[in-house]
């Protein structure tokens, strides 16, 4: 179902019958896989690719040219089930990428052009232009990487 | 599809065309997201909220007032593919909550009013009135927490 | 949707209206759950069981008698979004099993008759006839297990 969605030009939704998009904004030339849910108030920029099974609830903003891997899960409620006024926001800055099956906790900013590896759990902000990976996700390459942040997961 | 389901009063199923519920019991005033599967023999209590993409197979019991986050995965088969007589049961006690994308292994009891953080893998019982988090999930707050159980993930 | 799929004899697709299968080959007597996506060029052998919500994109080959647990995520793009010529392949050898919610990184071979525990992230090849578990998945039993490979997760 695509209900009350402001769709940009050239948006490609692979399986309109198998998505749940409502009360949100999708920018020009986005690409959206099957089994994706995008909830109320979400704003997605231009040329964003959203993989199959992604879950993008209220509170998330995705800027232009991002990549949201398949099965990525964004959250908003820190101590579920909590009141809406306590929910946190998530921002994916321009050109950032989340690998498959990442889970993003509320209140996090994914920095510009950063990349987070598949299966990571993102509990803190990811610096711009860095690569992070693991549970919890730590920077392993790029700006601000510290020796002690490297972990076995990335090896 | 909703097939052979005993539905309580006031159950809200957001996308009846995008769920797969069969041969199960859903209590009064439950709330069920899109892309949810609930399998044969599952019993869900009253006022339970089940997030999008949750997977709840045979062997799971969910008591009243629980919260099942989006993308939560329950399992039943310890050494897949094993014979049905070896499958384990999972019980969510009253008022307990599982954060987004948790994975629960067979044979586990999620204690009353406990809360497990997003992305955790639950391999053992969670004590009542505690908060647990991590892979595997460990108690970080509440009844029975030990110093050595605290882990980096929760910091 | 089932579009341009070469289906073997006796394939059981539980919810044909809630899967997304295209341009792929599915062998005889396979069993496919709801909310499954199988993409272009994927070849699935005979008697494979694919759990609900599994995501199987281009680049994956699954041999006979495998078990793909619910919510298993295969990937193909190592540094997303990357060019298709850099994508990696994944092979599940005969009789291997992936527990629920595993994530498999590109370039990995899951060895014959091996078993990987639920929630694992598989970053390297899994030897045949072994049991592996964890993040990243390490061998805990069977051929080639080393003492130092054992980890808390499996205890």
Image (cartoon, coloured by chain):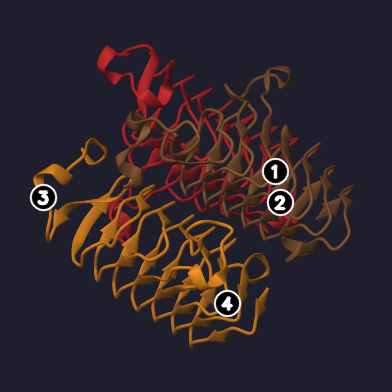
Chain colours: A orange, B brown, C red
How far, Cα to Cα, is label 4 from label 3?
Answer: 38 Å
Report the Cα–Cα distance between label 4 and label 2. 24 Å
Who is closer to the viewer here, B40 or C5? B40
Mark 2 vs mark 3, CA separation in Å: 44 Å
Sequence-wise, the earlier of marks 4 and 3 is: 4
Left or right of A39 in this view: A43: left
Q: Which residue is mark 3?
A: A146
| Secondary element at tag 3 | loop
Residue pointed to by mark 1: B94
N-terminal-most mark, 1 or 2: 2
Quadrant where the N terminus of chain B lies? bottom right
Query: Residue at left 35%, top 79%?
Result: A64
Q: Is residue B145 above or below residue A120?
A: above
Eye-nearest disc, 1 or 4:
1
Residue C111 visible in rendering: no
- The quadrant holding residue A115 is bottom left
The percent coordinates of residue C150 (x first, y second) are 33, 18
Q: Residues at badges 2 and 3 in contact (C-beta under 8 Å)? A: no
**Badges 4 and 2: C-beta atoms under 8 Å apart?**
no
Verify CB contact (< 8 Å) between mark 1 and mark 2: yes
Label 1 CA crowd tier, 10 Å (few <14, some 14–19, many 20+): many
Q: What residue is at 84 percent from the left and 55 percent from the top?
A: B28
Q: Identify the residue under disc 4.
A: A40
Chain label for disc 3: A
Q: CA distance from mark 3 to mark 1?
A: 44 Å
State the residue position of label 2.
B65
Provide the secondary structure element on which disc 2 rests: loop
> Dot 2: few (<14), some (14–19), or many (≥20) neighbours within 10 Å?
many
Disc nearest the viewer among 3 and 1: 1
The reply, left or right, for residue B63 in relation to residue C6 is right
The chain letter under disc 1 is B
Q: Using the numbered discs, state the Cα–Cα distance from disc 1 to disc 4 in whole angstroms.
A: 29 Å
């Amino acid at each position: 179902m695509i209900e009350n969605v402001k769709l940009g030009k050239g948006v490609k939704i692979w399986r309109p019958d198998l998505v749940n998009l409502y009360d949100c904004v999708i920018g020009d030339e986005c690409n959206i896989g099957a089994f994706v849910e995008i909830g109320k108030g979400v704003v997605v920029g231009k040329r964003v690719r959203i993989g199959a099974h992604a879950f993008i609830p209220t509170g998330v903003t995705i800027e232009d040219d991002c990549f949201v891997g398949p099965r990525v899960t964004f959250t908003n409620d820190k101590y579920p089930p909590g009141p809406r006024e306590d929910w946190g926001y998530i921002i994916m800055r321009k050109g950032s990428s989340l690998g498959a099956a990442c889970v993003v906790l509320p209140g996090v900013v994914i920095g510009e052009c950063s990349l987070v590896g598949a299966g990571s759990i993102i509990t803190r902000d990811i610096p711009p232009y860095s690569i992070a990976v693991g549970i919890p996700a730590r920077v392993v390459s790029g700006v601000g990487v510290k020796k002690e942040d490297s972990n076995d997961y990335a090896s």
